[in-house]
Image: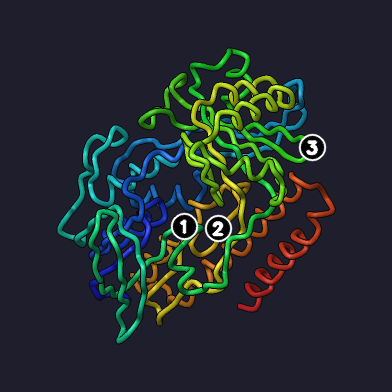
Amino acid sequence: MAGKKLDVVIVGGSLTGLLHGVVLKRLGHNVRILERSTSLNDQGAGILAREHLQNFFSKHDLCNLPFYVQADPRIQFLNKEAEIIKVWKAQLRMTSWDNVYYRLRANFDGFESDYVKERPLEDKSRNGNVSYEYGCTVTDLKYSDGLVTLTFERSGGGGGTLHADLVIAADGAGSSIRRMLYPNVERKYVGYAAWRGTTVESEMSDQAKTRLTTCCNYFNHKDGHMLLYTIPGKNGSLQPGERLLNFVWYCNYAEDSPEYVDLLTDTDGHKHRITIPMGKMRPEVWSAQKDYAKSLLPAPFSEVVVKTRQPFVQCITDVSAPKAVHFEGKLLLTGDALCSFRPHVGASTNQAALNALQLERVMKGEITLVEWENVCLQYAELTSLTGVTLGRWNQYGLWKTLSSAFWLAKAYLVMYITKLWR
């Protein structure tokens, strides 16, 4: 791929698509992003800015603005009385989906927002042409004579056919491209869901702010656990008081239980499969969860839950594709479309950044696509198994953790032996 100017289509305009779009545009390739949604609003999610995402921004971000909360280098575990019972040393940098999204949009197509109010200055003569198109759903995919042909429909009517030298499938855990390639690979619900939400720091009591805002906080309980940390606030503000306290609360739900059905039935009576969007949760369901929080959680934790105005729920699933490279290297599965991790590892965006940075090396002729795929699949396997192990340990205890811990240890052993042989 090195040296040739390509026409690239990226399916999916969230973080994974934009990370790849920025890299490819800066290398001089023409990039067209097709996003299925008619708009991408704040998804209300905290993100751990891990090493590959930090490296990506150090190399490719021209906005030159801080984008994460620098917390104290520790994770603290609390008991029901909000007393610290254990501390782990860990340097975590927390950010948010919207903060990363608008920064990437500014770098990709110069999109101006309240997060990034001025277009970053760059040498446009080196860049390829780019476009970001909402409301585009890919309905068919074919490969012939070295070109990938995509058929897509627009939400307002119409659509068309595109021919691409390279297609990046970056359309998330529910990837339509992955389903076309592997119709028998499906997302599998793993028995628990994550309640998520945020509260403005200034609305919290002094007790809660003192206990929670300086680092990442954990509380474990029977059949679940919760973590809580500080992320950037409105328009990416890092000012104390304007930041958000973000919680993720994991609770077990049997798939055939009435509670599971209630959880995924929205205000219109529609039964969802994976998530209840913001604003669609039935008031009685949220009221019951708040009562549960007050009876179970430490006071600072329950305060954050009770003061959350826009909660949402995400059922935890596992899904992965066996390969990343398809159509003789002309179609690549990346990010969650390749392998979707459980949120415990905080590595979804990190995986996408790794995929993009390694693809940059392919484009420069530093590594081959085979090497790119090996790196991506190895990271996916190890991180996925880590997420499964952490999830089982926190939700179900030791015995249900043993099998995944065995496979995780085996995967690391294979990796180290392979390195020694090289």
State the residue position of label 1: 172
Which label's residue is closer to the chain start, 2 or 3? 3
- Res 244 seen here: yes
**Residue 195: % across, % down:** 60, 37
Residue drawn 39% across the image and 67% down it: 361
Q: Position of residue 407 (x, y in %)?
A: 74, 65
Q: Which residue is label 2 attached to?
A: 340
Q: Which residue is mark 3?
A: 222
Instruction: Give how far apart the Cα atoms at labels 2 and 3 are.
Output: 26 Å
Task: Specify the amino acid type for callout 2.
Answer: Ser
Residue 283 location, quadrant: top right
Query: Disc 1, disc 2: CB below 8 Å?
Result: yes
Tell me where residue 175 appears, x and y as whole percent: 46, 62
User: Picture quarter containing residue 223?
Assistant: top right
Identify the mark nearer the N-term, 1 or 2.
1
Q: Tell me the quarter of the image containing the N terminus.
A: bottom left
Please name the residue shown 43% across and 28% down the image.
233
Where is the C terminus found, in terms of image quarters? bottom right
Locate residue 80 relative to residue 246 in the image: left or right. Answer: right
* Foreground pick, 125 / 48: 48
Gap in Å between the C-alphas at discs 3 and 1? 31 Å
Q: Residue furthest left?
A: 125
Q: Within 10 angstroms of label 2, few (less than 14), some, or many (20 or more) residues? A: many
Q: Residue at x 31, y 83 (%)?
A: 146
- What is the three-letter code of the residue carrying label 3? Lys
Along the viewing direction, whichever of 94 and 71 lies nearer the viewer: 94
How busy is the neighbourhood of tag 1: few (under 14 within 10 Å), some, or many (20 plus)?
A: many
